Image: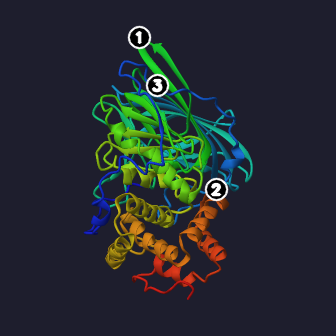
Amino acid sequence: MRRLRGTAGLAVAGLLAVAPLAACTSSQSSSEAPASSSSAPPASGAPAVEAVEPDLALAESTPREDSLYPSVGHPDVDALLYDLDLDWAPTSRTLTGTATLTFRAARDTRAFRLDLADALDVESVTLDGEDASYAHRSKDLVVRSPITEGDRHELVVEYSGSPRPEPAPTTRSDFSEVGFTVTERGEVWTMQEPYGAYSWYPVNDQPSDKALYDITVTVPSPWTGVANGRLVSTENSSQEGEDLTTTRWQLDEPASSYLVTLAIGDYAHRSNSSTSGVGIDYWIPRGLPMAYDDLKVAAKAVDWIEQRLGPYPFSTLGLVLTDSQSAMETQTMVTLGNNEYVRSAPVVLHELVHQWYGDQVSPADWSDVWLNEGMTMLMQALYEADRGGYDVEAQISQWRAQDQQLRDQYGPPGDYDPRQFGGSNIYYSPAVMWDELRRELGDEAFFEIARSWLTDHDNSSVTRQQAFDHWEAETGLELSAFFDAWITGSRTPPKGLIGS
């Protein structure tokens, strides 16, 4: 999720005083491909790769009702593959879509529900090739067909309308809406944490239900549609005298719906790669070539992360620059806003760490978003210390001193006010917790366990109890009092709880 500048009076000067980093140590190098010229076709410089056959078994999961936002998502449907065919008309602000959902029935039910905003009109619904009875009220698309636990089905929904963002359950100053956002020029970007994917396609919009994605986007040329995963084709066509560009993207490892992105605009493409060989694609609005000078630090940031968390967990990596003022760890295609702060090396690093903590392994319930943000915030602090030379211990002590203020304002990291999503407590308080454990174990042992957690839970959505059990088993320490105090306690935990 977006890294905070600092809210509720939280002092974070130790981090923010570090200047954005344009380079890392001289031992880390990257190779760069030339940028697309402004007169080139939209996807010039972005070669398509061969599509792969989706492995639906990767996406089997156990969906659940969220404890904080029970009205979004539903445990009846285990989505396996979303095949989205989208046409965007920027002049009329109209989205026309066909969503083909392959899913497994998670339990017996006489009707099942998906999330779909009422700004979108449903034109037809078929289930396994037959017309299905349905009702679409508010954000609920209810299909009145019985399904039996374990059976696989194919649901096709045709829809259209003028999407709009949805209100966010937060008091943060840097975002108040989530989902499909349209600029004055008709460009599009999406960020949807904790929900909001339903603002542009029918979806089981809860993080425990990971799925594969195949997204095809048709837009007027020279604009390009950018989404998650690998670019498998780009086609140019003409319809009623209008030149169109169609891109097809494929996400071959499962993602929670909040990690899916769509960006539409006039994009140029650049690329470089990390020392370890991770290729990185950059989608930058034409006319902003200098933005690449900020973003290309991603290649060296990946090298730094891999040294601690292990190999990059996906087959592709990209960054797309949008008109947002924030940033989001959308899986394999990080979405960044267009300002110097969001383009800075620490923010880029933060969103890249989420590819491991948050994307490869995601929370099963929004009460555990701290699992994403605490480890990522600690990694950001260590990164900035390595590159800027400030004292991590002093920074962590500063965060610890602010912990009680955060608990009083937002609640504990694992028991926060659902109207205060994304408060500073889910970032800084668990970062202090993880740092105390790191200092107890030492870096080598700490990061070995951090890596084994990712390996053991690859492509899954997890609970806090799974995390607690993993760290206790791997360390051999009694950590119940330590974790409980930090994650659900109302008071700042005292030091010395590890092993007590």
Which residue, as the protein is rendered here, is positioned at the far left?
9
Pick the residue in front: 386 or 152. 386
Q: Which residue occupies 36% across, 69% down?
A: 391
Q: Residues within 10 Å of mark 2 (few under 14, many from 20)?
A: some
Query: Mark 3 or mark 2: which comes first in sequence?
Result: 3
Residue 354 in view in this figure: no
Which structural element holds mark 2? loop
**82 versus 459 height, above or below:** above
Which structural element holds mark 3? loop
Q: Residues within 10 Å of mark 3 (few under 14, many from 20)?
A: many
Label 2: which residue? 458
Residue 311 in view in this figure: yes
Q: Which residue occupies 38% across, 49% down?
A: 327
Pick the residue in front: 341 or 110. 341
**85 versus 477 height, above or below:** above
Q: Which residue occupies 66% across, 52% down?
A: 110
Label 1, label 3: how far apart the Cα atoms are:
21 Å
Label 1, label 2: how far apart the Cα atoms are:
47 Å
For the residues labelled 1 and 2, say whether their Cβ atoms are less than 8 Å apart: no
Report the number of discs. Answer: 3
- In the rendering, which numbered label is found on residue 43? 3
Pick the residue in front: 242 or 161. 242
Identify which amino acid the numbered label 1 is placed on.
Gly
Which structural element holds mark 1? loop
Identify which amino acid the numbered label 3 is placed on.
Ala
**13 versus 130 height, above or below:** below
